[in-house]
Image: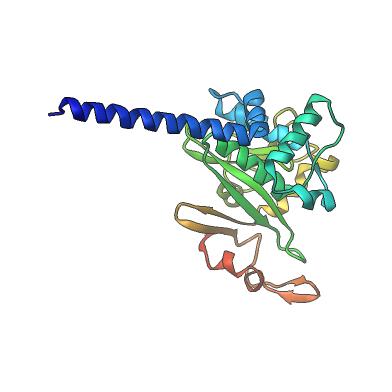
Amino acid sequence: MLNRNNIRKLFIYGFVFLVLLVGVGLYRMSVNPNLDLIIKNISAPENFVLTVDNIREYVNKNSVNIIDDDFWSYKSDHERVAGMMIDHESGLSTYKPHLECSARASLFKTLLKRMRYKVRVVNVWTHLDEFPSHTFLEVFNNETKKWEVSDADYNLYYEDISTKQRLSVNDLLRLDQSMYHPCGKDTGCGWDIQTKGNDPANNLKKYMALASYSDDDGRITVVNVNRFSLEKPALLKGENRRFCDVFSKFCSARMIEYP
């Protein structure tokens, strides 16, 4: 049985733990006020889908896809970039921070992880010269128990046309592309909808061939063998190279193949 001294000790330990917990929370708020302000202003805590869509759209609309000296100077400084986005959204500045697909995905990931969402970064490639790539996120939906693609660079997610369920990158590589389409929060769905730079979303089809991401069991690479040949070389910096010769870490990962 607990005596009075033990009860007093448990109370003190509990109080100290609570103070530390509050202190950590206040510290996080103090060192990342811009990130937390974005979350506070646009998240919908009781609605997972709306929160993810709102944050993805915010990152997309308050940045521009440019790689220049500005981009390199702040691409990984998420708090600074968030501040520039707040200034643009509020009308205090006409300047949009310069980001590209991986930097947008990284900031998007930081915002979602601050909300305790489970997130992973996905890299995809197409089998063309120079092995062009693209980067987006998957976010785990606790209600559906599924990973769902969310692309901040193009401001898109993907859904099954018949069921309207949101899809994972494994779904995008596994399913026939006539069975699903990309969707925007306000643009509707379809491969012909306009995305960044007024490019049709149809341009993204070619990337649904090979993907790699990390989960609790390590890195996983997923390939649709009819869309991407690991044995067929492509021209890279003037030389014919196979994908696995160039990106060996992705080929040494656990491999999932779809026909």
- Residue farthest to the front, as pictured: 5
Q: In the picture shown, does residue 251 fall above or below 109?
A: below
Which x, y percent locates residue 226? 63, 61
* Quarter of the N terminus within the rendering: top left
Which x, y percent locates residue 171? 57, 47
Most foreground residue, 252 or 173: 252
Most foreground residue, 173 or 57: 57
Most foreground residue, 140 or 200: 140
- Residue farthest to the bottom, as pictured: 239
**Colour scheme used in the picture?**
rainbow
Question: In the rendered picture of this protein, how many numbered marks are placed on residues?
Answer: 0
* Quarter of the C terminus within the rendering: bottom right
Residue 160 visible in the current orientation:
no
Which x, y percent locates residue 228? 65, 62
Indicate the quadrant where residue 82 lies: top right
Relative side of 64 to 110, left or right:
right
Q: What residue sits 68% from the left and 50% below the top?
A: 135
Q: What residue sits 60% from the left and 52% below the top?
A: 173
- Residue farthest to the right, as pictured: 94
Most foreground residue, 212 or 45: 45
Relative side of 81 to 209, left or right:
right
- Residue farthest to the left, as pictured: 1
Residue 199 visible in the current orientation:
yes
Indicate the quadrant where residue 224 lies: bottom right
Which x, y percent locates residue 115? 55, 33
Q: In the picture shown, does residue 94 fall above or below 229?
A: above
Q: What residue sits 20% from the left and 30% below the top?
A: 6
Q: What residue sits 53% from the left and 37% below the top?
A: 117
Q: In the picture shown, does residue 128 fall above or below 140?
A: below
